[in-house]
Image: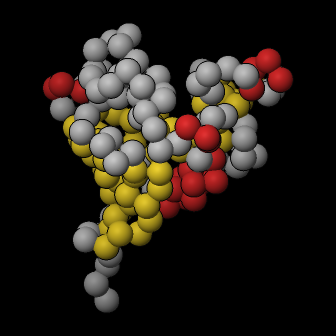
Amino acid sequence: MKKSPEPKIRISVRRQELVLKSGRKKLAEYPISTSRFGLGSKEGSFKTPTGKFRIADKIGDGMPAGTVFKSRRPVKATKKLLREEDLVMTRILWLEGLERRNANTHDRYIYIHGTNHEEKIGTPASHGCIRMKNADLLELFERVAVGTPVEIAP
């Protein structure tokens, strides 16, 4: 029996969507939100990097949906905290850049993560990361592994 190709993620900034594929077969499609500051890899720019990446780490397995993370550790979600602009919630898929131009991605803490602002999904609104609806991220998290290829296209 022929084994299915390993899944890969393709993110379109223009369409604000993430597609999970196996070979040519589309497994899933999700709306996302990239940076409201545009595209780029400069440290401190809050921009979304482009190019080829891989998932370097998966964080949050087994935690309840809606868990808030600070420095990749779960914290108590207070009312004040939930009003913050760019929370990292539910799960974290930490990206590592594979090209010279985006090699600093891991050090910039660029993730695919859940958000407390699901109403902004579909429009550029993040501080550099790829935001997803929490339920969509839970589904994606279960379908990918550390090492899964990710491409972010303008």
The quadrant of the image that shows the C terminus is: top left
Name the image quarter holding the N terminus. Answer: bottom left
Residue at left offset 40%, top offset 52%: 18
The residue positioned 38% from the left and 21% from the top of the image is 37
Which residue is drawn at the image coordinates 47% and 51% (left, top)?
A: 31
How many numbered discs sit on the rendered protein? 0
Side of 9 relative to 135 (left or right):
left
Q: Please identify the residue farthest to the left as the structure is shown.
A: 100
Residue nearest the observer in this picture, 10 or 7: 10
Above or below for 18 versus 52: below
Percent x, y of residue 138: 61, 53
Task: Identify which residue, 83 or 10, lies in the foreground.
Answer: 83
Determine whether, in the image, residue 10 is placed left or right of residue 137: left
Query: Is there any visible trace of residue 154 in the rendered image?
Result: yes
Colour scheme in use: secondary structure
Q: Give residue 119's quadrant in the image.
A: top right
Residue 55 lies, in percent from the top left, at: 39, 43
As displayed, is residue 30 above or below residue 84? below
Instruction: Answer with left or right where residue 120 lies relative to residue 54.
Output: right
